[in-house]
Image (cartoon, rainbow, N blue to C red):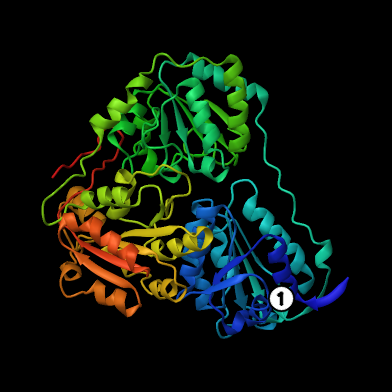
């Protein structure tokens, strides 16, 4: 055992745990750690806001399945991390967030930039620590990596007082080993029962959740669907888990990011096999309609998820990959392809119930933007989107054929997530990243365009500019019958987002004609720079949604 600074030991642990990218902002409270980070093989990207650093680390994982770390200083730097930590954790994204802290002697004494971030983050993280004993540094980081990755993954926070960072500790890197991760296997009897229940059902369907993507099990899930001829509905977090034109693809269901085909197929079903999903409110809507008389098989790696929203007829605690493999094996032995469901009719139904996007009028109907995104990028780009009416249109209308190509802020709905998450995704994969957002959300973390430009990462920002807080306008209009302070006509007038883009060394263009959306996106790509394409849209267009799967109102323009 040799002696070394705790900070040097931490950086060596990060390297052994496979970290190659770090996103953060140096500061006095974390500079003990940055000394050794700067000497390491880990590439650090300096952001313009601490929250954005966590979104970037989250986007890095969402796109690649590889963990990154986020770092910041104490006090307001650390409190700026909270929204990023929450955004990752609610979507089961493993990220290690490291915050600097005042020296231990100052804790609880209102010292400058001294705040109990471990306690603040506790409700929105998987686990938090404030390390006050240097001898506990190594075991804490080992546990942090383990907990971030095991079971239902999540965001973890380690708060490091400056004197702990600078303390000498005993550490031998050669003896450090990441804690092995085991995942729960399904009980064979439960798997047999699940296949028997599917065999007995008249209209079963397969609900694929984001956990299937996290478990790298989408291919096996498709094979299971094909073996049993099960229609497939994906939750919003699993968008791309089945190709758009796959014969069994029945789209999304839900009260916002749902589609007419998904809602119809779901309501026609009598049994739902849900794997890696959480049955959250935007997906289910009114629970009495969602549950109906149908049976539910719920498979999730986290026992707390099963029965959390409503009781399952069969609950199985298991890793999604292991469960799907076991189901596939049992299906090939004892399953029978469902012959009640009109699986052969799904492609025709998809075409019949598809929402219209081919709008030619001016002002531009927002739906047309998504048709152009589908046409322009195909399967070559990764998309991020944060919250609001634009996110819902995006989820409803964008066509995604592969996993990890569509990276929304699903559970948190965080405005400002989009640009830094796209940056992190592009760093992780080298692919074109496109951030899709509204005009209001654009200004939440617009400063991150500077980070894209500095690092020569050509993120394309597509602004669906409807000069409104569009989702809130619609909620006020239909739920309450009034409108208050949601109009932002200045965003189509006195605000010049092209100048904003150019001020951050990016390409910028404003589009008024629907036929110019595609060419503008091409010009953005050809510029080789980060870009902002500000698309001026009709302010009064509503988004199809409802309160239950059977009452979603459709709007056509």
Crowding at mark 1 (Cα within 10 Å: few <14, some 14-19, many 20+): many
Question: On the image, which quarter does residue 489 sit in?
Answer: bottom left
Q: Where is residue 446 shown, x and y percent of the image?
A: 36, 71
210 is higher (above) or lower (below) than 85: above
Question: Horizontal placement of 444 versus 73: left or right?
Answer: left
Question: On the image, which quarter does residue 257 sit in?
Answer: top left
Q: Quadrant of the N terminus?
A: bottom right
Residue 276 in view: yes
69 is higher (above) or lower (below) than 482: below
Q: Secondary structure at mark 1?
A: helix
Q: Where is residue 359 shown, x and y percent of the image?
A: 16, 47
Closer to us: 191 or 282? 191
487 is higher (above) or lower (below) than 189: below
Residue at image coords 22%, 49%: 367
Name the residue carrying label 1: 7
Residue at image coords 69%, 60%: 17
Q: Where is residue 266 shown, x and y percent of the image?
A: 36, 28
Q: How many marks?
A: 1
Question: On the image, which quarter does residue 506 sit in?
Answer: bottom left
Residue at image coords 40%, 66%: 458
């Amino acid at each position: 055992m040799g002696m070394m600074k705790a900070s040097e030991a931490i950086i060596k642990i990060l390297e052994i745990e496979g970290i190659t990218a770090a996103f953060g902002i140096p500061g006095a409270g974390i500079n003990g750690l940055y000394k050794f980070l700067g000497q390491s093989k880990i590439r650090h990207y300096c952001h313009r806001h601490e929250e954005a650093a966590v979104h970037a680390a989250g986007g890095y994982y969402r796109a690649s399945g590889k963990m990154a770390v986020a770092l910041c200083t104490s006090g307001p730097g650390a409190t700026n991390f909270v929204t990023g930590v929450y955004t990752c954790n609610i979507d089961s994204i493993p990220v290690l967030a490291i915050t600097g802290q005042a020296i231990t002697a100052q804790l609880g004494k209102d010292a400058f930039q001294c705040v109990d971030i471990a306690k603040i983050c506790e409700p929105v993280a998987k686990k938090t620590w404030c390390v006050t004993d240097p001898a506990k540094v190594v075991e804490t980081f080992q546990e942090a990596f383990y907990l971030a990755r095991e079971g239902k993954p999540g965001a973890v926070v380690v708060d490091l007082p400056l004197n702990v960072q600078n303390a000498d500790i005993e550490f031998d890197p050669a003896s450090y080993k990441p804690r092995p991760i085991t995942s729960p296997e399904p009980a064979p009897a439960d798997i047999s029962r699940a296949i028997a229940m599917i065999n007995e059902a008249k209209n079963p369907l397969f609900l694929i959740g984001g956990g299937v993507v996290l478990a790298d099990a989408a291919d096996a899930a498709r094979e299971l669907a094909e073996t049993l001829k099960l229609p497939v509905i994906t939750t919003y977090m699993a968008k791309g888990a089945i190709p758009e034109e796959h014969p069994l693809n029945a789209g999304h269901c839900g009260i916002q990011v749902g589609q007419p085909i998904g809602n119809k197929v779901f309501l026609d079903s009598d049994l739902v096999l849900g794997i890696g999903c959480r049955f959250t409110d935007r997906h289910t809507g009114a629970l009495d309609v969602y549950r109906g008389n149908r049976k539910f098989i719920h498979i999730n790696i986290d026992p707390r998820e099963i029965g959390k929203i409503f009781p399952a007829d069969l609950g199985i605690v298991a890793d999604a990959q292991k469960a799907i493999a076991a189901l596939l094996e049992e299906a090939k032995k004892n399953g029978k392809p469902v012959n009640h469901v009109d699986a052969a009719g799904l492609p025709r139904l998809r075409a019949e119930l598809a929402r219209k996007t081919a709008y030619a009028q001016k002002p531009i109907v927002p739906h047309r933007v998504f048709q152009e995104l589908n046409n322009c990028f195909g399967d070559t780009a990764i998309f991020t989107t944060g919250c609001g009416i634009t996110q819902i249109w995006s989820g409803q209308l964008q066509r995604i054929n592969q996993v990890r190509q569509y990276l929304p802020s699903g559970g948190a709905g965080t405005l400002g997530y989009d640009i830094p998450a796209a940056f992190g995704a592009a760093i992780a994969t080298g692919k074109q990243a496109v951030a899709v957002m509204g005009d209001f959300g654009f200004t939440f973390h617009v400063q991150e365009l500077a980070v894209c430009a500095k690092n020569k990462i050509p993120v394309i920002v597509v602004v669906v500019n409807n000069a409104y807080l569009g989702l809130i306008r619609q909620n006020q209009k239909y739920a309450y019958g009034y409108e208050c302070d949601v109009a932002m006509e200045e965003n189509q007038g006195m605000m010049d987002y092209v100048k904003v883009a150019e001020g951050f060394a990016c390409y910028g263009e404003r589009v008024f004609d629907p036929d110019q959306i595609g060419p503008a996106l091409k010009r953005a790509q050809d510029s080789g720079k980060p870009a902002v394409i500000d698309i001026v849209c009709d302010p009064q267009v509503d988004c199809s949604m409802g309160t239950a799967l059977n009452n979603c109102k459709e709007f056509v323009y």
